[in-house]
Image (tube, grey):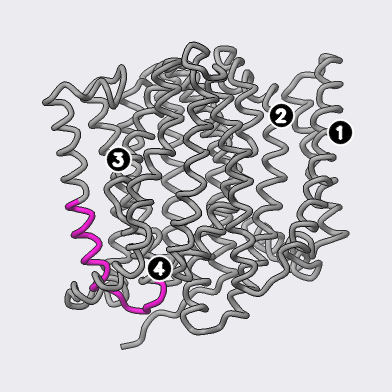
């Protein structure tokens, strides 16, 4: 049997990046459609329910997805593992809806989902599970080095979803239910197309093989045992901020936090494109004993992705006073301070996703558990302190308080994981930290002068925001680009690679024209 070749890392990343860019462009166009048409209250409730569904799913999943992806990356053919994971997902889904049913039967739903209707809870939970299943299929493809097709399918479905979303908005048919049904239909079609390709066309890699239950259960236990307490504990800690905002401040304040969180997620376009590839390569090369190769991959991705997320975060933060009312409407102007803070959350997330992926891909789960639980104790206290009203001995900061805690405290804690990875891969952490500090100061300085200064001058002089914003954005990215050209090593690349990528993109554009 001749197995399909593994797609190169560069090709996988470039295709994934282009797919993510297409989704980013679509998201920019549609970013204000759902918040504006649904209104702050409905938009806040939708995002609260989606966060609740994700937390419930995570609570029922003891490192199964992570161990599945890690083990699948280490084996060329893993049909037995895929079958076992599908069985586990089925059990997990049944437990999820059983818990919702029990809560509803004993009149506990209001306590866990304050102010929410039962049918809406069920619909959003279904949507969350279908989207998660599609993500698991995409990760299965990534683990086999088969990234291109799933990414292209996802990008095409994003275009179709955006088109229908705009049609519903124009026809004034967009509401809570039609928004869910549209996203559910898109997720189902995407999962069906990717699933047929992986489990049908490439069934020899992804599906064929008899079940080896005991073997994989033993491997899972060695991998997941250190994480079990953490996996059941941390989803609740993560959800606490969202829950407290909903309970104490209501759905409108929740919508401000949700808008900031959703828009800031657009900054993760580069990290999202690379994460599964990064995890797969680290897991594969360390399993082969090639630690030097793994260390090169880690350092390169770490420099590049942190830099790119920082550049986009600064842009989003300093342009938020213009973007939020322009795209989401005046009803969301009060969300600007929260948006300016949460714009930097993707930088923290990039650190978190890369460091966590490297730790778990190298199966150092006991270290990850111990430090995560230690950090969670101050996290819990800080979350209550910044969110609680004054009568509850808190700072009464609401969404912006939770945002500040997530960005600043999360960033500080993740430096421990970063240091541990640099030590594991025998790299110089102090030198790297100094290099990143210099890059941070350069990017932030550009943002303050260009986006914070020139943009405000243009707005004060009554230049229309649709003219001023593109002009200063081009200037900002241009100046940052000059910095990359002068010091490419600091961001994980080199001039020859920049030239090669530019020529490749221009060549593809000419061919299409």
Residue 240: quarter of image: top left
Q: Mark 1 or mark 4, which has the lower sequence index?
A: 4
How far, Cα to Cα, is label 4 from label 3?
Answer: 23 Å
In this picture, residue 2 sits left or right of residue 268: left
Q: Name the front one of labels 4 and 2.
A: 4
How far, Cα to Cα, is label 1 from label 4?
Answer: 44 Å
Disc 2 target residue: 319
Residue 275 percent location from the top left of the image: 52, 59
In this picture, residue 182 sits left or right of residue 408: left
Residue for point 30% across, 73% down: 219
Most distant residue in the bottom direction = 1
Disc 4 target residue: 70
Q: Mark 1 or mark 2, which has the lower sequence index?
A: 2
Q: Secondary structure at mark 1?
A: helix
Disc 3 target residue: 56
Q: Are marks 4 and 3 in contact (CB under 8 Å)?
A: no
Pointer 4 local density, CA inside 10 Å: few below 14, some 14–19, many at least 20: many
Q: Tell me which segment is drawn in magenta.
A: 73-91
* Foreground of the two, 348 or 321: 348
Residue 411: quarter of image: top right
């Amino acid at each position: 049997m001749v197995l399909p070749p593994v797609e190169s890392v560069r090709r996988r990343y470039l295709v994934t990046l282009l797919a993510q860019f297409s989704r980013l462009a679509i998201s920019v166009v549609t970013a204000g459609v759902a918040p504006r048409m649904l209104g702050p209250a409905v938009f806040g409730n939708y995002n609260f329910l989606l966060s609740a569904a994700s937390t419930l799913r995570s609570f029922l999943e003891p490192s199964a997805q992570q161990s599945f992806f890690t083990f699948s990356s280490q084996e060329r053919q893993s049909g037995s593992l895929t079958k076992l994971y599908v069985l586990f997902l089925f059990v997990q889904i049944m437990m999820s809806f059983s818990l919702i049913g029990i809560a509803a039967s004993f009149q506990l739903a209001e306590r866990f989902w304050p102010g929410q209707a039962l049918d809406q809870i069920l619909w959003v939970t279904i949507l969350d599970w279908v989207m998660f299943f599609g993500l698991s299929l995409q990760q299965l493809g990534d683990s086999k080095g088969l990234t291109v097709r799933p990414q292209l399918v996802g990008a095409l479905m994003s275009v179709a979803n955006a088109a229908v979303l705009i049609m519903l908005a124009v026809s004034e048919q967009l509401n809570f239910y039609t928004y869910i049904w549209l996203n559910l239909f898109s997720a189902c079609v995407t999962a069906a197309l990717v699933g047929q390709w992986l489990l049908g066309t490439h069934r020899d890699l992804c599906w064929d093989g008899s079940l080896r239950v005991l073997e994989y259960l033993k491997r899972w236990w060695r991998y997941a045992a250190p994480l079990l307490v953490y996996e059941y504990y941390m989803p609740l800690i993560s959800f606490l901020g969202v829950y407290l905002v909903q309970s104490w401040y209501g759905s409108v304040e929740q919508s401000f936090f949700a808008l900031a969180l959703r828009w800031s997620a657009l900054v993760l376009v580069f990290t999202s494109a690379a994460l599964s590839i990064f995890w797969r390569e680290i897991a594969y090369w360390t399993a082969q004993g090639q630690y030097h190769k793994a260390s090169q991959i880690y350092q390169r991705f770490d420099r590049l992705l942190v830099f790119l997320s920082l550049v986009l975060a600064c842009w989003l933060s300093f342009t938020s006073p213009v973007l939020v009312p322009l795209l989401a409407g005046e009803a969301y102007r009060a969300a600007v301070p929260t948006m300016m803070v949460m714009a930097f959350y993707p930088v923290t997330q990039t650190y978190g996703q890369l460091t966590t992926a490297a730790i778990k891909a190298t199966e150092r789960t006991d270290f990850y558990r111990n430090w995560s639980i230690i950090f969670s104790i101050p996290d819990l206290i800080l979350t209550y302190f910044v969110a609680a009203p004054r009568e509850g001995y808190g700072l009464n900061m609401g969404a912006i308080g939770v945002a500040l805690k997530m960005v600043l405290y999360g960033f500080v804690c993740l430096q421990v994981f970063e240091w541990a990875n640099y030590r594991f891969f025998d790299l110089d952490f102090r030198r790297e930290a100094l290099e990143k500090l210099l890059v941070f100061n350069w990017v932030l300085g550009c943002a303050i002068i260009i986006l914070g200064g020139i943009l405000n001058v243009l707005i004060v002089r009554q230049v229309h925001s649709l003219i001023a914003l593109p002009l200063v954005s081009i200037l900002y990215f241009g100046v940052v680009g000059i910095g990359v050209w002068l010091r490419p090593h600091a961001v994980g690349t080199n001039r020859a690679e920049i030239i090669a990528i530019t020529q490749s993109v221009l060549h593809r554009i000419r061919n299409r024209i």
